[in-house]
Image (cartoon, helix red, strand yellow):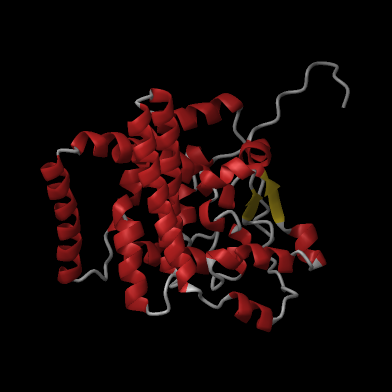
Amino acid sequence: MNTYDAKISSRKIKELSVLQPWRSAAAIVFDWAVIAAAIAASEFSGSWWVYLACIALIAGRMHGFGVLMHEGAHYRIFRDKRLNDWVTDIFAAWPILANVHGYRQNHLAHHQHTNTDKDPDWTAKLGDGAFAFPKKAWQAAVQLLGYLVAINSARDLVRMAPRAVSSRATRRYKLLRFGYYLAWGALFTVLGIWKGVLLYWIVPYATLLFLILHVRSVAEHFGSMDYDEELGSTRTVLPHLWERLFFAPHNVNFHLEHHLYPGVPFYNLPKLHEALMQDEEYRTKAHLTRGYSTGLLRECLAAPAAAPNSAY
């Protein structure tokens, strides 16, 4: 693979890599606040249409938890590593049945061996029809429908299960995590709100969250990519405004920038992108796609067969 020699100063990277823990804390509070507001709005309205809109918002914020777990895996939430991991687990990873330790083991290997036989993400998806491109439109539609009925979500959850168990987890850690889920279960039972948990947590988790995660996974390294070039093997998506709610929370769309400089926290990725765009090589060779629902879709769908005698 041809690597990219970035024309950006080490001073600039050091500046962009400075942690601002309050911004991470604000992101966590924001995600939980949106979920609470969505539940309240749905309950107040009593409308199924509002409910459907709200579970989409909730799934988007669950995706936000996943992004913050990713930040925690890079120790980008707090400077203190123990605090970083506990806050990430309790407020972002455990609520979506993941943990930062297990995710970190897999994810750092992905960074070290991106798109090679030693990349655990790559090898898990290589040969999987879900990640074979280009697709016909009906094939892509069937794939997404499989998430809406939770079939594909169950498949992905099984694949994700090994990451939910960290080989570094101590007995104390396991007991604390079990106690975390037990305490929430007891609280739900006492309050008699298991129906609400089903409607507002399990439904978005088992359907739209995994659909969103699949789209993002495709966007990052699949569909019309050039794996011989570092700048062509990872995609940055410049999303439409509405897409930020679901596919691109906390600037996760700047994936190429993140691969080049994983020490830059999520809130500085837009600035990193602007700095890199000043370099002609990056500007001309970087795989930048406009929109998940527009550019990414075009790059992943097979072109229709030309009609007989059609002009080129």
Question: As rendered, which of 301 and 73 lies closer to the eye?
Answer: 73
**Nearer to us in this view, 86 or 51:** 51
Task: Name the foreground residue: 41 vs 108.
Answer: 41
Q: Residue at x 17, y 44 (%)?
A: 188
Does 181 sit left or right of 245 as displayed? left
Residue 153 at least partly seen: no
Position of 1 with respect to 204 (left or right) is right
Q: Residue furthest front?
A: 44
Residue 18 seen in the current view = yes
Q: Position of residue 289 (x, y in %)?
A: 69, 48
Q: Quadrant of the C terminus?
A: top right
Quarter occupied by residue 199: top left
The structure residue drawn at horizontal position 25% and vertical position 39%, both measured from the top left corner, is 197
Give the number of callouts: 0
Q: Residue furthest top?
A: 308
| Residue drawn 35% across the image and 41% down it | 205
* Residue at 62 percent of width and 44 percent of height: 241
Q: Is residue 153 above or below residue 97?
A: above
Q: Quadrant of residue 140?
A: top right
168 lies left or right of 219:
left
Quadrant in which residue 234 is drawn: bottom right
Locate the N terminus by quadrant.
bottom right
Residue 126 % position (x, y): 49, 48
Residue closest to the eye, 80 or 258: 80
In the figure, 218 relative to 280: above or below? above
Q: Residue furthest bottom?
A: 11
Image coordinates of residue 172 in percent, x first then y, are 16, 70
- Horizontal side of 32 relative to 140 (left or right) equals left
Q: Position of residue 142 (x, y in %)?
A: 49, 27
